Image: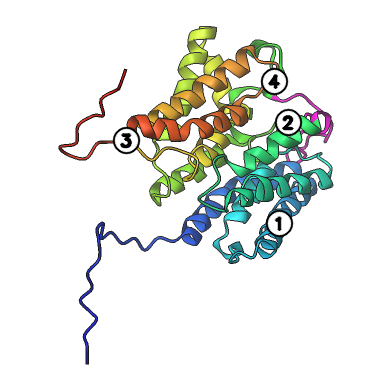
Amino acid sequence: MEDNRFLVSSSPHLREDTSTRMIMLDVIIALIPALVASIWLFGWQAVAVIVVCVGSCVASEYLSRLILKRPQTVGDLSCIVTGLLLAFNLPASIPLWEAALGGVVAIVVAKQMFGGIGHNFVNPALIGRIVLLMSFPGDMNTWLNPVGRGLDAISSATPLAVQSVAESPYDLGTLFFGAHAGSLGETCAGALIIGGIYLVIRRVIKPTIPLVYIGTVFVLTWLITGQVYDATYHILAGGLMLGAIFMATDYTTSPITPWGKVIYALGCGLLTVLIRQWGSLPEGVSFAIVIMNILTPLIERVTHSRPFGQKRRERHA
């Protein structure tokens, strides 16, 4: 009998037991602290938005794969992660049909039309948020105070929408624990940090992009305002923590080279500060990450390492 145990194949001969499903499960686990915090702070409205976003993303994934006659990928849990991240980028007061539409855009337009997971060139959840922001600015900028800490659920300005940090009614402790108006998953910075630490320990992400991104926003804001307090305020307020930890680190849309990660994160931080300080919108995280997503192939081309002994290509006049 012929023995086929000795196999000959081309390199590389690397094997990794980690699967997409395992990675996405770790991300879901890391999002649980922020999920619990959002429900505690915003009550049943948060539950409704989360359920609708996740349900819309799962249904869109299943139906689009069915229509396109591609193998089903609902089981890899990536659509659930997209649904959670989309929900975390939306206010609790958003009409549920708009939240569902955001899920369709995120999965069908930003993901499946480009081939599915691993082929999208921008973060699907952020595209869903940006489309909703441009289409329904009124609903996307109506914020509710949290109800879980004894506050009335009335419309209120987010911490970044104030004229100046000095006039803000929120202190750093309030921002850290999330007792303020904002999107579902961005308010409680402490819960997001816990999730980020879990992902680093599980080696799902490396800390390079979050640390460089957040550090860039801190340093630039400090230089512009001259106040350490203001710089710390801008780190804890808005969607910086959510974006830096859970969306800027997306495998498909971020560089894989070490220096590429640094350049990418620096760009995210610079664009975020520029939009926040001089743009017409108080928040710049979504647009900053999407722009750097688009530049990722160029960053990788510039920062990739050359094989040993290979010479640089000469430029022709």
Of marks 2 and 3, the one in the foreground: 3
What's the amino acid at mark 3? His
Q: Label 1: which residue?
A: 60
Residue at mark 4 to residue at mark 1: CA–CA distance = 30 Å
- At 71% from the left and 32% from the top, the residue drawn is 182
Q: What element carries label 3?
A: loop
Q: Estimate the x, y position of residue 46 in percent, counting from the top left.
A: 75, 46
Residue carrying label 3: 304
N-terminal label among 4 and 2: 2
Q: Distance between the residues labelled 4 and 2?
A: 16 Å
Q: Which of marks 2 and 3 is nearer the N terminus?
A: 2
Query: Does the magenta segment cover residue 156?
Result: yes
Position of the N terminus, as image quadrant, is bottom left
Residue carrying label 2: 181
Q: What element carries label 2?
A: loop
* Secondary structure character of the magenta stretch overall: loop
Say which element carries label 4. loop
Chain-order first, disc 4 or disc 1: 1
